[in-house]
Image: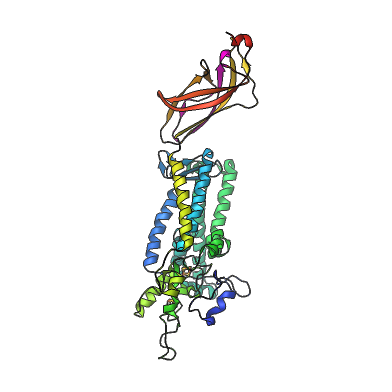
Amino acid sequence: MRTDTAVPHGFDAEHDSFRGELASVHKDGRRKWVYARQPSGRFYAARTLVSYVLMALLFLGPFVRLHGQPILLLNVLERKFIVFGLVFWPQDFYLLVLCVLTGFVTVALLTSAVGRVWCGWMCPQTIFLEMLFRKLEWLIEGSAQQQVRRDKAPLTADTAWRKALKHAVFFGLSFLIANVFLAYIISADALWTIVTAPPREHLPGLFAISVFSLVFYAVFARFREQACTLACPYGRVMGALVDEHTITITYDRSRGEPRGKLGRGVQDMPRGDCIDCGQCVTVCPTGIDIRNGIQLECVACTACADACDDVMRRVSRPQGLIRYTSEEAVRTGMPNGLSWRVKAYAVVWLVLFVAAATLIARRPDLDVLILRQPGTLQTTLDNGDVSNFYNLQILNRSNRPYTLTYRVVDPVGGSITALGPIGDVPPYGLVQSRFLLRLPARGISGTSTPVHVEVSDGGELVATVETSFLGIANEQEQGR
Ligand code: SF4
Ligand code: SF4
């Protein structure tokens, strides 16, 4: 499962067995359960802090409101997205595509430059699994060693209640996460309606929450690291983005090899700093040995770096045998540099980022769209005026309300009669309505007459909209 085909610098063929097997799968194909030891160290402390901030953001995003809107909403059903006060409606789809594209290039750039830093530090899967579910598991079932002992021994009452409690807590948390997940999609208000109303009135919502809860429970209780190593598409493409210049969690073979246990072997034999204690493997949540080089299963969680730093401290050797560096820097002993690939991604990213930021900044606060209602015919009134029905759509991207008035400026003499609410537009609101546009016969030219409508708010012009008027006026009336 290595991503690179070349044998890494300093690699010993004696440790080559990992190439033909997955760390979390037995030779006969059965799942090999990974009992990861709890790491401790500077990286783990930093990750814990980052994870608490991100978890708070994830849990509170759809519920905390800014100007009456959630700070985060990903309503794919209505194609309405809110990101920290920026609202994207279906009309902003091109912007959304540009932002998603920028996001993909950001991930490609980050991965090429610093490996799977997203996986180790920011991915919700890693954060929930390593910083919530696994910590609770250690709390309830004990350390990794205690868990191994319990699982190998015959079932006892002590093991049974711990497992029952753990799975009950896991399911409760999965239910909570499922609710939050749904709040992101349908909004907190809609979720509250589902939660408080009788279940039979919201069967689809109830079904969705149940399915999400079961999926999250299955992922965090059973599937675990397999989500990263087998299912996640990002993990699959990592091999194409990472190269020998990528700065990621790397074992320094130049320093570590030849490895050997402390106090064993021929004393005058040259020895590297790795004492082959295996601590870096026992903390790994995907069960791999980082000393085999960059591997697809590595989620760059830094646990092995913390574990090895602790070992190095104890044996009075310099820390950083496993650290953030690149294969190239380890091989050559030179400082890390930026590869041409990273520079190229950075240029593309900058272009996309500037384009997206400029388009977002220049978006008008108000979008007014007037379209003639399809399938309707002109109506000729008693005084000879001709009228058409129109659909009106107003989209407010700002946090202020609007009270709009409309004036037909061209052709002169035209007027608008509302057939629904067309004046008041709430903050971040979408108003869809209809009106009747009446033109005097003398203002009509040909079968399609261009019409200009000025839209004002409190006397201030906010938009001038052009639409077309379909209709033919009576020649006699036109001459009046
Ligand atoms: S923790 Fe460090 S010293 Fe121990 S096996 Fe891993 S790399 Fe070698
Ligand atoms: S090899 Fe190290 S960084 Fe990679 S997943 Fe395992 S513990 Fe985390």
Specify the quadrant that holds the N terminus. Answer: bottom right
Q: Is residue 469 above or below residue 262?
A: above
Write the start and end of the magenta stretch as one range: 419-443
In this view of the protein, which residue sits in the foreground, 431 or 157?
Answer: 431
In this rendering, position of residue 328 left or right of residue 223: left
Q: Where is residue 263 in the image (x, y as percent from the top left)?
A: 41, 88
Quarter of the image where one finds residue 320: bottom left
Pick whichever, 30 or 373, lies toward us. 373
Q: Give the residue at x 49% y 66%.
A: 162
Residue at image location 44% in from the left, 90% down from the top: 265
Number of numbered labels in the structure image: 0
Q: Residue at x 62, y 14 (%)?
A: 473
- Which of 456/128 is in front? 456
Image quadrant occupied by the C terminus: top right
User: What colour-coding does the image apply?
Assistant: rainbow
Image coordinates for residue 94, horizontal then vertical, percent: 53, 42
Magenta-span inclusion, residue 442: yes
- In this rendering, does residue 443 appear at all? yes
Q: In this view, does 211 lie above or below 398?
A: below
Residue positioned 52% across, 52% down in the render = 178
Look at the image and say whether residue 317 sits in the magenta stretch.
no
Can you see residue 86?
no
Q: Where is residue 384 in the image (x, y as percent from the top left)?
A: 60, 11
| Residue 167 image point, x, y percent | 52, 61
